[in-house]
Image (spheres, helix red, strand yellow):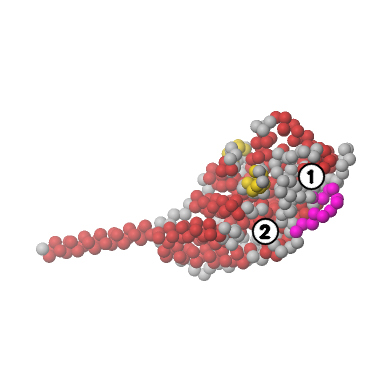
Amino acid sequence: MKNNSYIYILLISSIFSFTIISCKKEEQKIVVTPESYHGLVDKLTQIMIHDVFSPPVASRIYVYPNIAAYEALNGNSKEYKSLSNQLNKLKITKPSNEEDVNHQLSSLIAYLDVAKELIFSKEKLLQYRDSLYNQWEKRNPAVFNNSKTYGLHYSKQIIDWMNKDNYAQTRTMPEHNVFSDDPAQWKPTPPSYMDAIEPHWNKIRTFTLDSASQFKPIPPPKFSLEKDSPFYKELIEVYNTHKEISKKGDSSEEIAIARFWDCNPYVSVTKGHFMFASKKITPGAHWIGICKIACLKSKFDFEKTVYAYTKTSISIADAFISCWDEKYRSNLVRPETLINNYIDEDWEPILQTPPFPEYTSGHSVVSGAASETLTSIFGDNFYFNDTTEIPYGLPAREFKSFRKAAQEAAMSRLYGGIHYISAINLGLTQGHAVFNNHQEKINYTY
């Protein structure tokens, strides 16, 4: 009987020990995958669309959370270098304790913590964050809390650095002056005649550029309405291109291209006496979406995924600063204004003209920088199916390379009737220069 009791006690003890070990094993499983990171980026994009951020501001919202995630992930990496003392004015200190830290989890936490500081609809992101926090904490409270402390150590430093980039100061600077009789100067365009956005974006601290004007493009063709002048020839090219496209009908390839790359968050839709905005992604968001597509196709692991997003978002952010510097220097009038005033008062572009000066083309600069960045990561001749615009009612388009996509994005501005050809071609060149500088200055790997 004593032997039976002894065996019974051993059996209960074994079951109890196995249960504890099983629980401990279960607690350790905080699963972080590349899809986890894509989910954060997608959520931030959705909130940005809801909040209707301008293209330059959207680029800022993407870049800082990615840098925070990159630093939290790679603070002690043997493969990826910290961006501390590489990006302008960025200095990062490492935490003293890394015990029981899941660095991938810390990366997600750092991303969320910085992102919440950049948007209007904070509650949407906080609800999303808290639901993730609850899941992670239930799985392993100790690892979650250690990883959270570790991630916040990096995000707090990135937020401090971010808050010194002059963005807050530009919020109180004067609006762009449009009171000029000079026909060459930019004027607000139909249908909403919005003020020019972000006239002081060149004062935002750059990431890799020495200054906003480092890659100042050559001036656009000298303004002239003489029919044999280079400028007028570019103007009439916009008008004639529109006429040829219109003859083909609404299903033409050029119209499909124009609409696919529209990426204008300020499109105004009029119904009766009401006018409202049609919410869309920005040019930067489109290329961030392409980055996701390439990561998934290449089956990038978590570390490579964070690296790809970070490098791409830095190029996009610098591209906007470089482009906006030129826009408000040249302050060039849009084709729509001149065509309505001097050629055809009833003419309307296929795309709605965005509210800022013409030269250079923002989408061209950003596409040039982003496409070269993605090529440096994934290689040339990278075939992909661009599904980025499907959520906004447009079919996917196929591309043989990122550079081919950038060329199409740039030409979409001519097809859409919103840019002259110089702004398109020189915009791509400007974007390439921004990337080349980035590539030369920043070392991501050992």
The spot of residue 442 in percent (x, y) is 65, 56
Which residue is nearer to you in this view: 245 or 410?
Answer: 245
* Amino acid type, callout 2: Phe
Location of residue 211 by image quarter: bottom right
* Quadrant housing residue 260: top right
Residue 214 part of the magenta segment = no
Type of amino acid at the residue the image marks with label 1: Thr
Residues drawn in magenta:
175-186
- Check disc 1 and report its element: helix, strand or loop: helix
**Label ID, residue 408:** none
Name the residue carrying label 1. Answer: 337
Is residue 181 highlighted in magenta?
A: yes
Few, some or many residues within 10 Å of mark 2 (<14, 14–19, 20+): many
Residue 382 versus residue 319 in the image, above or below:
above
Find residue 50 and report its horizontal and vertical position in percent: 59, 52
Q: Residue furthest bottom?
A: 96
Q: Which residue is mark 2?
A: 207
Q: CA distance from mark 1 to mark 2?
A: 35 Å
